[in-house]
Image (tube, coloured by chain):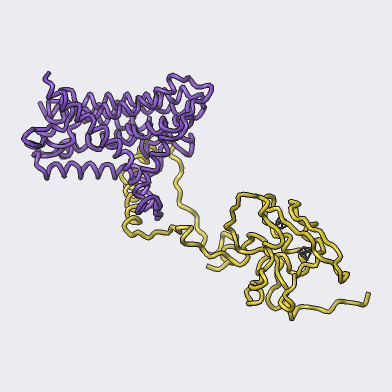
Amino acid sequence: MKMEEFNNRNVTEGDYFKCDIADYPTTGWDKFKRVMQRTFRGELFVGLWVVMREMIKFDIHTVQYPEEKMPIGPRYRAIHQMKRLWESDTERCIGCGLCEKICISNCIKIDTKIDENSRKEVSEYTINLGRCIFCGYCAEVCPELAITHGGEYENASDQREHFVDYEAMLTPLDTMLAGGQKEFEGFGAITPHEDERVKKTPLAY
Amino acid sequence: MDSAYLIETIIKVVVILLVFSALAGIGTYFERKILAFMQRRLGPMYVGPFGVLQFGADAIKLFTKEDIIPTGVVARIFKIAPVITAATAFMAAAAIPFLPEFEIFGYTVHPIVSDINVGILYILGVMAIGLYGPLLGGMASANKYSLISAARAAAVFISYEVVSGLAILAPIMMVGSLSLIDFNEYQLSNGWLVWSQPVAFVLFWIAAFAETGRTPFHLIANDHELIDGFGTEYSGMRWGLFFIGEYANMFFISFVIPLLFLGGFGDGSVLGAFALLGKMAFFFFFFLWTRAAWPDVRPDQLMWLCWKVLMPIAVINVVITGIVMM
Ligand code: SF4
Ligand code: SF4
């Protein structure tokens, strides 16, 4: 079924039809007739047959979770990841602080300093996942596609301080060198055909 | 009363207590599995192979949980209520012949604790006392949901009792005895009572659902309306006693229905014994089956059904039986 069929709310066309629901009986005789109909139509046995059929078919839909896992979509917003640049393997984050600013639950804490080459460097970056609502705003606002969401949803620890600092989020260097960094496809990520749509910065003004 | 009789009776009581307490536990396993399969799930899977040891884990949990008596409850009644449910369920078993009599080491064993001459009346009466558990427990709980549940228990109680009593009046008239053993003997010579008393059979079966409080008459502890009804404030083994009582009741009524209407254990051979167990298993399975398939009725619908539909039918059935017998 295509989406248009659902979006078309004009009930006079298409496959719409009115449900055939009888009115409530008012007179005693009608009520009696309805009781009789319901008693002898055998609807209860239809119900019994349906569940019995399912039991015999044994078409089990359970996912036995720790052993089996459902695939999750690429747009899934779980624990954050910090990406590295493909070209130089250095961190993408430029310390602009936009993510800290936009975070609606105030859970990102970022501090920067000027390093020995007089460049801005992120000296401290933590996300308090106890507060994070996984809204994805940080991933959307990041101009460098540095902070993104990952697919890791199984996290447990005995210390809430373990969630989550810069090192834990950053793509490990060996994974990066092996080409194992996955780009985030969700909110705020680059769409396909981005190259054709990119425009020159207007310098006229 | 000689001592051999006394020892035999005590052994029988202990065996019945142990077997049916264990069965009540295993019954929960079957219930969860069958419900799961009917809903395309797997049910318990982790404790033991296919989860068969789940009831053991549940038992450990129930036994070791803290027994909380909340402030504000009427403590004495609150404590005794679950015991009423469990105890009466097992007391009712005293007059049920679970198997035909058999010989072991040259000693004839009657697998019935006491073949009293008012057997079926005793069973129904004692089972009905079991409803005082929910009633008193609910009223003593100082919880609104429990109170509603208690009120419903009373409503259910006065509704189904009439139906079950009148329904089996007609078979009793035909058999001329209240003992379940006599019922069995009668059906052995005259054919199963379900053929001569089909209406009574269906009525009694419906009343059995109300008696055990199973779906579609699961309104005393309807989870989606009343949390756990009378059990809301209970924890640990006291709640477990309610549970054991409910499941033991299901097993016992599953024995009583075949004994009354479906020929019981027949001629008393091994085959007959297995036939009785098979019939019992079917009725127990049917309790689970309906739970997966049928919706619950409202309390007023249950009372409407019992008083305005089933009771007149039962009375008519008794009258017709009387006329035919004359
Ligand atoms: S997902 Fe939302 S709440 Fe979580 S860190 Fe990002 S902006 Fe803050
Ligand atoms: S918005 Fe992106 S680049 Fe800016 S500080 Fe946050 S993670 Fe770094």
In the picture, measured across the screen, residue B28 lies left or right of residue B103, that is: right
Q: Quadrant of the C terminus of chain B?
A: top left
Q: Nearer the viewer, residue B38 or B190?
A: B38
- Residue lying at the far bottom in this picture: please name it: A196
Q: Nearer the viewer, residue B136 or B153?
A: B136
Q: Eyeballing the image, is B258 above or below B83?
A: below
x, y percentage for residue A162? 66, 54
Q: Quadrant of residue B271?
A: top left
Q: Quadrant of residue B116?
A: top left
Q: Quadrant of the N terminus of chain B?
A: top left
x, y percentage for residue A62? 43, 57
Q: How many marks?
A: 0
Chain B, chosen colour in render: purple
Q: Quadrant of residue B63?
A: top left
Q: Eyeballing the image, is B15 above or below B278?
A: above
In the picture, measured across the screen, residue A83 lies left or right of residue B19, that is: right
- Residue lying at the far front in this picture: please name it: A116
Q: Quadrant of ligand 2?
A: bottom right
Can residue A77 be seen? yes
In the picture, measured across the screen, residue A36 lies left or right of residue A68, that is: left
Can residue B178 be seen? no
x, y percentage for residue A44? 34, 46
Q: Eyeballing the image, is B81 above or below A163?
A: above
Residue located at (46% from left, 23% from top): B139
Q: Eyeballing the image, is B106 above or below A2?
A: above
Residue located at (25% from left, 30% from top): B314
In the picture, measured across the screen, residue A6 lies left or right of residue B219, that is: right
Chain identifier, colour yellow: A
x, y percentage for residue A145? 73, 69
